[in-house]
Image: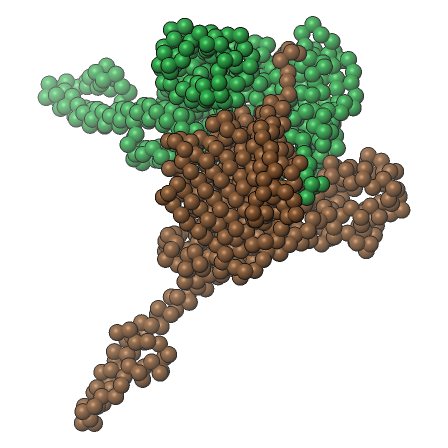
Chain colours: A brown, B green
């Protein structure tokens, strides 16, 4: 198995691992690197604003330094960072503030640090952070990463006012701006569908100045951190919870530790399992813990998970932003009730849109979002794409190509990304069936929209024919009656059918 | 940016990261988990045998314990493990013996530990390891992982003889054997193409007993660990090398630290760069280090990298195994000279095969291998698949579907996998162009094979026609000559055209 003589065994730090495998974190080539740096900084900027409950105003400034070196600066009006956390937040992989069970855009403690690392190895330049929290002095820090130790190295550190409070981060890196430009613009545009309440500005050198967003004044629902759902109780989680609550009875333990387990449910579950509900958790044998874990994961009478840890985009804001960006002729919104995969709650919401801004297709064009973040790469291996392609869209009105797109947003406390670069969703059976239901619901909306438009065009044709004959009849009747004036046929038809006569 | 109050910041261990994101390491669902466990154990078993230079004899035994629990045992005749390294080799993520610059199947120090972790969280059962090195007493150890600390926890430890030396590992896990069965068989079958010198046996309960391999008695070329190629000198690598060689002149430093840099090349490079070659490396300013790193990565007169750290399958062994498994009518082998991506050497080799065992297709069916390991999942996002699909195969003889397959093997000291689950290759420009060349070379072979077979079928048709007329002529001549015996026409034709007469 893992082999070799004694002396060539060694440990590497997580920073070293991702330094060696940059492509896994979205930094595999100079094009991706520019895109991922923008993405990670913007994600964090949006999270920081929502933390503070302000409408996000994000500014992205990209400057070419020479042919293949550039600087990327992202500013926000969010919470700002506590002074003593800055070095590790930017200079340590797998360190962060977002490991609790709430929906966040960033969750790995990996993305921004990877951008800092990539900048450092390609330009030898430290990251520059200027941040200020409300009622604190501002801080201006530059730092690099000791990759072998996975530790920040602060280069300089000053008190410096920043007005208004918020954070500005600048990263210098080698990258291919020409090839990443369109992707960045697409990413920022779609970000304002994921976050319709946010305003995002982009400047690239002197050539590009764009702005999007503020499509909705509805603020996203606040999320709260929830207890684990009993279905997530694998042995690791169960043992951690048992260790944290040594003095409880098994009944109390279940009620205290999990969501969706009240007194009634706990009693019912324990009776069903044949457990003594007064037993202390410290008295549980290994065999009983095995039984308990298996039963918690399989018992199917627990309620669906609490969705208050999640924050969907919502019908009105999502429609507002899509209508502002694509002027569709038709939109329909669908929503799947909260469900869970391995105990992690998730929601799926989606919009079907028809309009000339989309390409005519026989399978709808798919725009994917996860926790409101647009996913642009690796579409074909994404489970959402696979489910979409499995449906027979000819049944849902796409017998011939039409300009149709679907926007789908997966919200979860644990998005099962296939890789640390967060570009595509893994094949989780529960997600698969939820996506199938959502696409079918949107398909039915598509079908009736298509039939309605077909009916209405048939109807128009009939009116057109009738109008032609009616004019002849009117004229003929007038001649018969020796009347020289012909009645106003067009307005009569308009009265009759409530349509315009277009011939 | 990364936001929040001070007290909710925290660090997680790499084990915790991959525990939370199991799908990234190939353990996302019960089907994948079974497959990945077999794969990781077999990979390590093969590496251990090659370490010892013995012909691998690998045994895989899978036993159902109940409907969704099973045990997987893999035995090898390899080096065995040093006693004191066993706990960390199996119980610590990012710990291993394969971080040097040589081609290995496993390189992350992640795979087997993930299998142990998955077994533990789904069945609460420790991994069982029985190993013996040559001239050492055997060891029998069971252990689990402290996931939060990323540390092994040894449960039991004994001296126990194992005959012959080698390693046996057993992991209990929850998984879906029914759905993973075919994939495991496919994986093991293809593994004997990647390693034609290996013998692999599989037993599943009482129902399946199969064996493959030992198709070649050619032993794979040994690999040696090579110095870095100058093109890999990003700032991180350059600084590490400078730190390790503080007393050298810049000229000596280049010759000592890198491959493909002898005295002549170093002088030429330094003159080209305008560096003083006698300058001590400790005197290099930051600005000069920046210039040096950029120049090393871009200077295009360094030789191609040393391929002795790589070990391709090779023409004869690869053909032998494919002929044994698929009985093709036609095979052709192609090979791309060693090249590098970001300084990491790589080789591409491939076989084109035509035969009734393959499906008729208009784009060849692709079997992917990386460092001799078959890649079965996530094909469509793999850069090799993408390059294959971009070619116009109708130009290479596939105007109509034919039963054609391509087997491609990428060897590198650093395979750029898209995710830690090692299933697909990221879009690295240098790999892309090498794959394009290889596929085109194989395409030309396909084209001439197709034309040859068309020519030969035209030729056969002509012979058939000629045979018919010739028989008439012979008979007619015999009648004219009043001869009652007709000469043996068939054998005459066989003599004439060296073909069988099939009518």
Tell me, yes or no, if residue A241 can be seen here.
yes
- Quarter of the rendering containing residue A153: top right
Q: Does A331 sit above or below residue A57?
A: below
Question: Is residue A414 visible in the rendered structure shown here?
Answer: no
Residue A458 screen position, x and y as percent: 35, 70
* Residue A50 coordinates in the image, percent (x, y): 60, 50
Q: Position of residue A55 (x, y in %)?
A: 56, 54
Most foreground residue, B268 or B356: B268
Quadrant for the C terminus of chain B in the image: top left
Q: In screen coordinates, is A180 left or right of B500?
A: right
Residue B340: which quarter of the image? Answer: top left
Residue B212 x/y as whole percent: 54, 20
Residue A47 position (above or below residue B420) = below
Q: Residue at x 21, y 86 (%)?
A: A475
In the visual, does A243 lie left or right of B111? right
- Quadrant location, the N terminus of chain B: top right
Which residue does the image show at 36% across and 57% down from the upper left? A356
Q: Which residue is drawn at the image coordinates 57% and 52% (left, top)? A: A348
What residue lies at 89% left-to-right and 43% top-to-bottom? Answer: A279
Q: How many marks?
A: 0
Q: Which residue is farthest left?
A: B480
Depth check: A68 or B355 in front? Answer: A68
User: Is residue B9 shown left or right of residue A167?
Assistant: right
Q: Observer-nearest residue: B456 or A421?
A: A421
């Amino acid at each position: 198995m893992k082999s070799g003589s004694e002396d060539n065994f060694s440990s590497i730090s997580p920073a070293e691992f991702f330094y060696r495998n940059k492509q896994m974190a979205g930094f595999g080539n100079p094009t991706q690197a520019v895109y991922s740096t923008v993405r990670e900084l913007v994600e964090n900027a949006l999270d920081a604003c929502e933390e503070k409950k302000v409408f996000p105003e994000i500014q992205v400034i990209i400057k070419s330094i020479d042919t293949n070196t550039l600087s990327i600066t992202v500013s926000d009006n969010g919470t700002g960072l506590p002074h003593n956390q800055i070095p590790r937040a930017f200079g340590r992989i797998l360190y962060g503030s977002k490991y609790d069970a709430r929906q966040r855009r960033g969750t790995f403690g990996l993305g921004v640090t990877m951008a800092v690392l990539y900048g450092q190895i390609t330009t030898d330049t430290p990251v520059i952070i200027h941040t200020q929290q409300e009622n604190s002095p501002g801080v201006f820090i530059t730092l690099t990463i000791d990759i072998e130790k996975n530790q920040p190295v602060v280069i300089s550190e000053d008190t410096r006012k920043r007005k208004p409070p918020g954070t500005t981060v600048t990263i210098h890196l080698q990258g291919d701006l020409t090839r990443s430009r369109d992707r960045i613009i697409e990413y920022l545009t779609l970000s304002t569908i994921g976050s319709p309440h946010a305003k995002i500005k982009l400047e690239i050198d002197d050539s590009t100045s764009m702005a999007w967003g503020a499509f909705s004044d509805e603020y996203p629902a606040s999320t709260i951190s929830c207890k684990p759902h009993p279905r997530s109780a694998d042995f690791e989680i169960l043992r951690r919870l048992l260790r944290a609550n040594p003095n409880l009875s098994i009944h109390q333990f279940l009620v205290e530790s999990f969501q969706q387990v009240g007194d009634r449910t706990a009693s019912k579950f324990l009776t069903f399992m044949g457990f003594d509900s007064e037993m202390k958790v410290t008295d549980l044998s290994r065999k009983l813990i095995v039984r308990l874990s298996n039963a918690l994961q399989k018992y199917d009478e627990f309620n669906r998970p609490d969705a208050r840890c999640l924050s969907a985009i919502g019908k009105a804001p999502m429609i507002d932003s899509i209508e502002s960006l694509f002027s569709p002729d038709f939109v329909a919104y669908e929503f799947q009730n909260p469900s869970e995969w391995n105990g992690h709650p998730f929601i799926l919401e989606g919009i079907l849109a028809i309009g000339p801004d989309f390409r005519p297709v026989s399978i709808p064009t798919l725009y994917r979002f996860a926790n409101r973040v647009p996913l642009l790469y690796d579409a074909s291996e994404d489970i959402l794409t696979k489910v979409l392609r499995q449906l027979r869209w000819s049944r849902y009105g796409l017998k011939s190509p039409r300009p149709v797109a679907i926007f789908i947003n997966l919200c979860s406390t644990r998005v099962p990304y296939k890789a640390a670069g967060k570009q595509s969703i893994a094949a989780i059976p529960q997600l698969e069936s939820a996506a199938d239901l959502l696409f079918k619901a949107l398909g039915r909306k598509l079908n009736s929209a298509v039939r309605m438009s077909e009916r209405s065009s048939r109807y128009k044709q009939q009116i057109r024919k009738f109008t032609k004959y009616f004019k002849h009849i009117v004229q003929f009747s007038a001649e018969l009656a020796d009347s020289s004036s012909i009645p106003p046929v067009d307005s009569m038809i308009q009265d009759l059918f409530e349509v315009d006569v277009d011939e």
